[in-house]
């Protein structure tokens, strides 16, 4: 008895499609994640003064610091590094407003002590003002540069 040629052809097509799908999936995942995530270290000093240290390897960005002068948190001597490669909402202080990890490093927006800080690959947007990414630079936030609060509706 002869084997059915349709069964053999179907198996060949199935294996071919499976290989094609696997290669396409791996390729898309590679291009989506190749640049790596934002790395943010949430810190506080011995007085509870909070700050962020931002790094992003593919951009060559290291140790850009954001300080919140005049603010304090209960946790002293905090140093917790988080890699934002998947959605996270529990951060040591403040809150996450928006997070897009479709293509890393993606977009990340925080609300910290009344300030809105958005990380984009091109630039950081701090209280609706663009701040260039510069390794080793420190950006200071305080009560005088907080955006006006929106009126209650």
Image (cartoon, rainbow, N blue to C red):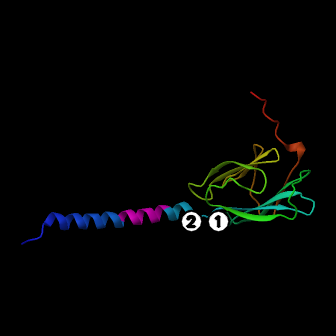
Q: Nearer the viewer, residue 79 or 144?
A: 79
- Whole-percent x, y for residue 118 in the image: 71, 49
Q: Which mark is residue 3?
A: none
Disc 2 and disc 1 in contact, CB within 8 angstroms: yes
- Whole-percent x, y for residue 122 in the image: 67, 54
When the figure is inspected, residue 46 is found, relative to residue 97, above or below; the finding is below
| Residue at the image position 56 percent from the left and 63 percent from the top | 33
Q: How many marks?
A: 2
Q: Range of the magenta residues?
A: 20-28
The extreme top residue here reads: 153
| Residue at the image position 89 percent from the left and 57 percent from the top | 49
Q: Tell whether position 27 is magenta.
A: yes
Give the residue number, with chain letter if any, for mark 2. Answer: 34
- Mark 1, Cα crowd under 10 Å, few <14 / some 14-19 / many 20+, is some
Specify the quadrant of the image occupied by residue 13.
Answer: bottom left
- Mark 2, Cα crowd under 10 Å, few <14 / some 14-19 / many 20+, is few
When the figure is inspected, residue 152 is found, relative to residue 33, above or below; the finding is above
- Whole-percent x, y for residue 48 in the image: 89, 58
In this picture, residue 150 sits left or right of residue 74: left
Q: Which mark is residue 58?
A: 1
Provide the secondary structure element on which disc 2 rests. loop
In this picture, residue 11 sits left or right of residue 25: left
Question: Marks 2 and 1, how far apart in space?
Answer: 9 Å
- Whole-percent x, y for residue 86 in the image: 61, 58
Q: Earlier in the sequence, mark 2 or mark 1?
A: 2
When the figure is inspected, residue 59 is found, relative to residue 148, above or below; the finding is below
Specify the quadrant of the image occupied by residue 137.
Answer: bottom right
């Amino acid at each position: 008895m002869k084997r059915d040629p349709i069964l053999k052809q179907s198996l060949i097509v199935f294996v071919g499609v499976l290989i094609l799908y696997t290669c396409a999936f791996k390729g898309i995942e590679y291009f989506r994640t190749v640049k790596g995530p934002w790395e943010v270290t949430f810190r506080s000093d011995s007085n509870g003064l909070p700050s962020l240290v931002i790094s992003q390897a593919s951009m060559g960005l290291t140790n850009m610091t954001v300080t919140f002068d005049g603010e304090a948190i209960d946790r002293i001597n905090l140093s917790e590094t988080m890699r934002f490669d998947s959605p996270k909402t529990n951060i040591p202080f403040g809150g996450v407003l928006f997070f897009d990890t479709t293509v890393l490093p993606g977009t990340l927006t925080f609300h910290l002590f009344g300030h809105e800080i958005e990380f984009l690959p091109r630039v950081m947007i701090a209280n609706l003002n663009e701040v260039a990414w510069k390794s080793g630079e420190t950006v200071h936030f305080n009560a005088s540069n907080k955006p006006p609060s929106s009126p209650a509706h």
